[in-house]
Amino acid sequence: MSQDFQTWMKSIQNEVEVALNTYLPSPELAPQALHEAMAYAVLDGGKRVRPLLVFAAGKLFSAPGELLSRAACAVEMIHAYSLVHDDMPCMDDDALRRGKPTVHKKYDEATALLVGDALQAQAFLVLAEASACADHKLPMLQLLAQASGSLGMCGGQAIDLASVGVALSLPELEQMHRLKTGALLRASVLLGAMSGKHLEANEVAALDQYSRAIGLAFQVVDDVLDATADSATLGKTAGKDAADNKPTYVSLLGLEASRQLADQLCRDAHQALTIFGESAQHLRDLADLIVQRKA
Amino acid sequence: MSQDFQTWMKSIQNEVEVALNTYLPSPELAPQALHEAMAYAVLDGGKRVRPLLVFAAGKLFSAPGELLSRAACAVEMIHAYSLVHDDMPCMDDDALRRGKPTVHKKYDEATALLVGDALQAQAFLVLAEASACADHKLPMLQLLAQASGSLGMCGGQAIDLASVGVALSLPELEQMHRLKTGALLRASVLLGAMSGKHLEANEVAALDQYSRAIGLAFQVVDDVLDATADSATLGKTAGKDAADNKPTYVSLLGLEASRQLADQLCRDAHQALTIFGESAQHLRDLADLIVQRKA
């Protein structure tokens, strides 16, 4: 990973932290307890993979900063809400997230439920209120709604729930992850690019191919880390998938074949970006980062 | 209530039922279990007060049918998702809604959580995909997001949660309801009117005044019914507020003064509509309906 990319990544992560703070409802406004809990759920956490994808894809077409920043915050708010709800006792029942107590542990379940609900609305609001013209924003709002809903992220979680203790085939496992995490990763890439301009069909196709590859790679690596890393490194409970009897790439393919698959998907991601030339360098670097990450 | 209004109401309720069916994800698409549960949460239930407000306000400015229908379905999906989450054990823990088992009773808590999440995304999608131009739809999407989020419905629910067992003053109780139910009722009225045309400031002011009056009236009547009607009539558990030690208009003002307040608010609502003349008749009828309802 180049020094240049590391510097860029840090600067985007800092910029996104400031932007999230700006676009969350002020904790000074009522209801303050809810706003404080929303900030707890969103700020100071995670690698900001989705915002990084938004900004990296934005570089393809010199997208304007404010729209990129709002799109990045919108996807991160959707992601954060999904984690809050996913951690609740009726779902994964997890006590630790990003090295901190989960929202329902820090506050209570009712607050966690409302934090997630309010963050979803806030995501749409942040994007809808960008200064770009309505024609520019509307397809982006549509994409965000599609990626978040029952044919995207929520749908993937429903399939995930239904698959506990069930022997999924590899294509079924891929379909589940394509929705559960892939849809929002794809939306991040496309929203970044769409912030710059209206996309041509071949550009959408290339970005779809890239997104599919990194989305699957992300999950394969998640499964490898869940099976091999410890909770302190991950910032969340390790070994949960096996304990919950959930199908994973590691359980289906084994550890070594899973690692090889991740490497192959990373090469696929690079391949997909050929038409964009040099301007796609940060997207290439992010594919590498996703496969090489240790947490 | 005139025969004319009764006929209109029935026809809108039927039209909305068909439209909701159309705009929900098809239960034939995967994940089918989630889509079936979403339909269970939304279809065949309630008086459709919010859609009726959308259509009645749409008559002020001869709004186009498709946009009205989508706006009506969007607010009803937001409303339905809020009921599903509100009924969950960590919130109101209710087993009965609209005379049927609540979603977490019929399915399970995880499904109820995802049904609510997916319905919220679907609401934004349904409105974003209307055939109207982007300039027309964008302010409507913004309003829907504001009304649903932490400064609207979710914020009201947070204040409601925090108020159990707390001695709220009348202004505090009003502020809570202004957000919890008022924000989405106001959005229904404004979305209907905005479907027709861009609103002038005096039109927004009049509709705001009307919305505030019916929003409060709605809640006052809810409290009266909760204290006086039985569960079978209400289609939900009666007497819950008192049992949960929640502040209500009845507990603060007494039954008779609450009934008088509802009547006064109904007159305020009529008063606010003066500038619209005859075209506002259905909005007047709806104010009467809200105050005179028995469930």
Image (cartoon, coloured by chain):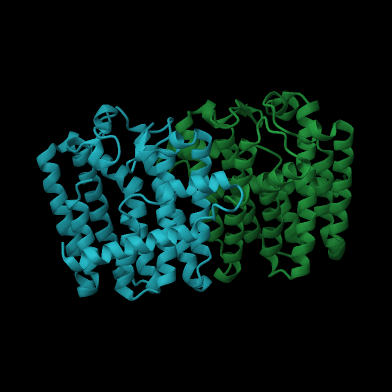
Chain colours: A cyan, B green
Q: Position of residue A100 (x, y in %)?
A: 36, 40
Query: Height in image: B94 above or below B137?
Result: above
Query: Height in image: A176 above or below A53?
Result: above
Residue at left offset 20%, top offset 60%: A269
Q: Is residue B102 left or right of residue A11?
A: right
Q: Is residue B120 left or right of residue A295?
A: right
Query: Height in image: B143 above or below A79?
Result: below
Residue at left offset 39%, top offset 47%: A153
Q: Position of residue B100 (x, y in %)?
A: 62, 28
Q: Is residue B102 left or right of residue B10?
A: left
Q: Position of residue B5 (x, y in %)?
A: 83, 49
The single residue placed furthest to the bottom in the displayed view is A62
The N terminus of chain A: image quadrant: bottom left
Q: Is residue B294 visible?
A: no
Query: Height in image: A167 above or below A43?
Result: above
Residue at left offset 52%, top offset 38%: A111
The single residue placed furthest to the front in the displayed view is A28
Residue toward you, A265 or A53:
A53
The C terminus of chain A: image quadrant: top left
Q: Quadrant of residue A214?
A: bottom left
The total of numbered circles placed on residues is 0
Q: Quadrant of residue A95?
A: top left
Q: Is residue A68 visible?
A: yes
Q: Position of residue B172 (x, y in %)?
A: 72, 43
Q: Is residue B157 left or right of residue B280?
A: left
Q: Quadrant of residue A213?
A: bottom left
Residue toward you, B127 or A15:
A15
